[in-house]
Amino acid sequence: MLNQLLKFTLISSLLLWLKPRWRGLLALSALVIAVHTFHGEYLDYAERSGDQSFLVWSYVIKWIALTVGVLIYMVYTIAGQNNRAQSVDETRLKKNRKVNAVPVADDGFDFIRKKKHLQNRADKIVGGDKREE
């Protein structure tokens, strides 16, 4: 029972963490796989042709491509977090403005607000409709 609860908790927390990040992680994974595939193909070509003059440069380009891809992903993630935080703040401000706004137009209850004294149920029972001011 506890084992199932632990598995459920771990899987659900992983899915909640992954939900806003899956597109970026998928793109980063595709980039890493593509770079490794192209580099492997180049190494195979260099081995078969015997031309190893650009072998060092292939490793440099590979690591530069991987590093740039990870840095772009990190910038994208940080910028996305800032945009989400700003949009949440703007949404909260809009809600607060709507709540704090005083209605300017007549809402149908101005005649009650203008009365000096409002009758409650007891006043109506005891006095009838005498106190209408």
Image: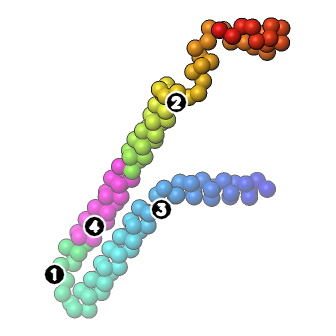
Mark 3 surroundings within 10 Å by alpha-carbon count, few (fewer than 14), some (14 through 19), many (20 or more): few
Q: Is residue 73 above or below residue 79?
A: below
Mark 1 highlights which residue? 53
Local SS, label 2: helix
Is residue 100 at all visible to an observer of this figure? no
Q: Is residue 103 above or below residue 128?
A: below
Q: Position of residue 2 (x, y in %)?
A: 76, 53
Decide which of tag 2 and tag 1 comes sooner along the chain: 1
Cα separation between marks 2 and 1:
70 Å
Q: Is residue 88 above or below residue 35?
A: above
Mark 4 highlights which residue? 65
Decide which of tag 2 and tag 3 comes sooner along the chain: 3
Question: Which residue is found at the position 44% from the left and 67% from the top?
Answer: 26
Which of the 4 quarters of the picture holds residue 62?
Answer: bottom left
Residue 99's tag is 2
Mark 3: which amino acid? Trp
